[in-house]
């Protein structure tokens, strides 16, 4: 950062533009949004370059070069337009710097240069450390935004994006490669033009701390639930229910991909910034029905970590420590007396203790903490996962299971018993 003299540049090694093409590209509204376009065209209004640049700076220059041709360049300068030209007039000028050298180093390509960056850096001195730190934070947010919006291009090796000289890694919101992620069948809509596919992300207990932090994205787990709308694999909407549902804590593991072609921009009311999309009325029922299935499964995983395991077990059942019941429309919780560790005790002797725990479970406090800070809870024995406490408890239950099972059967049973199902690596070591 160099205070008011800071410049930003964006460089690509694409096919470049001729002089006429560049002038047309710098003309606001250079495209008819209703004209038929190439299926891979990401533009629509012909405003992206101009609105993005003028939203951040008062002066920008574009240099472009076609293969085997000389580069061309033009500049928009708002101060020049206002004080001198009194009309919208491009000027042929290059900023100070080695821009000619940079463009000639490309066989073809384009460089966009921003100057007089008035929104982010107005009135900031280059020696202002606090401003510099804020500037770095903003740049980190920009990098994460790029990693999100263009993640499918990066993953598909269609392009490589570098930010301050470092390659940007894609952020995929669906954790597709994780073994605990549940994916739903793809649903074609609108005569196959639209494709919808749902994912239920793993419970926190199935993720490493690093995986958990990465999967929450820039806005956090609760905010990232919902539909992810893509147009030609570019993300337009990141985690919204499109007015069909409210965002609620227990649905935060549900994320649904919607793929659109650019021919449906009008029907989906894609805005100029390509950050807003609205589902057509005729598709809302289909989207709501599909999303309801994904959300229902997300609730199961969120509330009851063992349900996925239970469905995969035909003859045995998952044994949680606590069981949820209902009476007169109200929920209450009881200790599962069939849990192998609890059933091995003298139930008659500890029944008063069990009743005391059941009747004094601080449900209101848990609900408040869960809604205010949902990711602040430890998983069972997480604080002492490597200590002898959990291992000793595991050995006690394992030993009791060996009375009626082979060692392998006993280990399989342990994978269906809370909290041991959280620690398969310890079970393997028995």
Image (cartoon, rainbow, N blue to C red):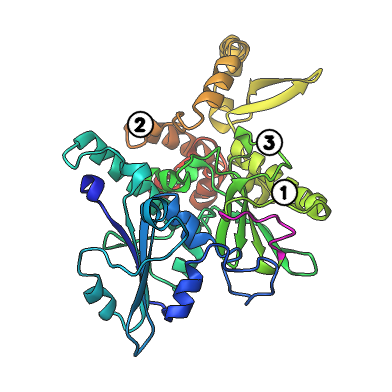
Taking the spot 37% from the left edge, 73% from the top edge, the residue there is 110
Taking the spot 42% from the left edge, 37% from the top edge, the residue there is 395
Taking the spot 42% from the left edge, 48% from the top edge, the residue there is 214
Q: Which residue in the rendered view is the most extreme toward the left?
A: 127
**Is residue 212 magenta-colored?**
no
Mark 3 secondary-structure assignment: loop
On screen, residue 16 above or below 153: below
Q: Which residues are magenta?
A: 264-273
CA–CA distance in space, label 3 to label 1: 12 Å
CA–CA distance in space, label 2 to label 3: 37 Å
Magenta span: chief secondary structure? loop
Mark 2 secondary-structure assignment: helix
For disc 3, the marked residue is 246
Q: Nearer the viewer, mark 2 or mark 3?
A: 3
CA–CA distance in space, label 1 to label 2: 38 Å
Please report contact status of discs 3 and 1: CB closer than 8 Å, yes or no.
no
**Is residue 272 magenta-colored?**
yes
Callout 2 crowding tier (Cα within 10 Å): few <14, some 14–19, many ≥20: few
Q: Position of residue 26 (x, y in %)?
A: 47, 67
Q: Position of residue 127 (x, y in %)?
A: 16, 39
Which badge, 2 or 3, comes first in the chain's sequence? 3
Q: Position of residue 5 (x, y in %)?
A: 23, 50
Which residue is nearer to you in this view: 393 or 366? 366
For disc 2, the marked residue is 384
Please indicate, yes or no, whether residue 218 appears anywhere in the rendered image: yes
For disc 1, the marked residue is 291
Which badge, 1 or 2, comes first in the chain's sequence? 1
């Amino acid at each position: 950062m160099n205070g008011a003299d800071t410049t930003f540049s964006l460089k690509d090694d694409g096919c470049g533009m001729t002089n006429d093409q560049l002038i047309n590209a710098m003309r606001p509204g250079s495209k008819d949004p209703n004209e038929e376009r190439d299926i891979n065209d990401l533009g629509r209004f012909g405003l992206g370059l101009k609105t993005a640049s003028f939203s951040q700076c008062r002066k920008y220059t574009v240099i472009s070069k076609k293969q085997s041709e000389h580069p061309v360049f033009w500049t928009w300068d708002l101060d020049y337009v206002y004080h001198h030209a009194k009309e919208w007039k491009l000027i042929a000028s290059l900023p100070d710097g080695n821009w000619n050298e940079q463009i000639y180093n490309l066989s073809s390509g384009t460089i966009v240069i921003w100057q007089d960056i008035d929104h982010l850096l107005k009135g900031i001195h280059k020696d202002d450390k606090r401003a510099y730190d804020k500037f770095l934070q903003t740049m980190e947010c920009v990098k994460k935004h790029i990693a999100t919006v263009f993640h499918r291009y990066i993953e598909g090796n269609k392009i490589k994006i570098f930010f301050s000289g470092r390659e940007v890694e894609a952020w995929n919101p669906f954790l597709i490669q994780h073994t605990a992620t549940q994916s739903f069948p793809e649903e074609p809509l609108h005569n196959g033009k639209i494709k919808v596919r749902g994912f239920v992300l793993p419970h926190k207990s199935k993720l490493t701390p690093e995986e958990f932090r990465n999967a929450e994205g820039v806005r956090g787990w609760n905010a990232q639930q919902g539909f992810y709308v893509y147009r030609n694999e570019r993300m337009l909407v990141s985690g919204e229910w499109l007015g069909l549902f409210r965002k609620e804590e227990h649905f935060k593991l549900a994320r649904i991909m919607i793929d659109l072609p650019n021919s449906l921009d009008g029907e989906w009311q894609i805005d100029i910034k390509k950050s807003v999309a609205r589902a057509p009325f005729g598709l809302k029922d289909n989207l709501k029905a599909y999303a309801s299935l994904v959300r229902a499964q997300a609730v199961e995983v969120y509330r009851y970590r063992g349900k996925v395991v239970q469905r995969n077990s035909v003859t045995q059942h998952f044994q949680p420590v606590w069981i949820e019941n209902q009476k007169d429309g109200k929920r209450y919780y009881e200790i599962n007396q069939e849990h192998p560790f609890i059933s091995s005790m003298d139930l008659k002797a500890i029944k008063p203790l069990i009743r005391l725990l059941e009747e004094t479970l601080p449900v209101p406090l848990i609900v408040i903490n869960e809604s205010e800070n949902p990711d602040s809870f430890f998983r069972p024995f997480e604080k002492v996962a490597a200590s002898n406490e959990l291992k000793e408890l595991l050995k006690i239950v394992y030993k009791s299971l060996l009375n009626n099972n082979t060692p392998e059967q006993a280990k399989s049973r342990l994978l269906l018993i809370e909290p041991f199902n959280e620690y398969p690596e310890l079970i393997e070591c028995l």
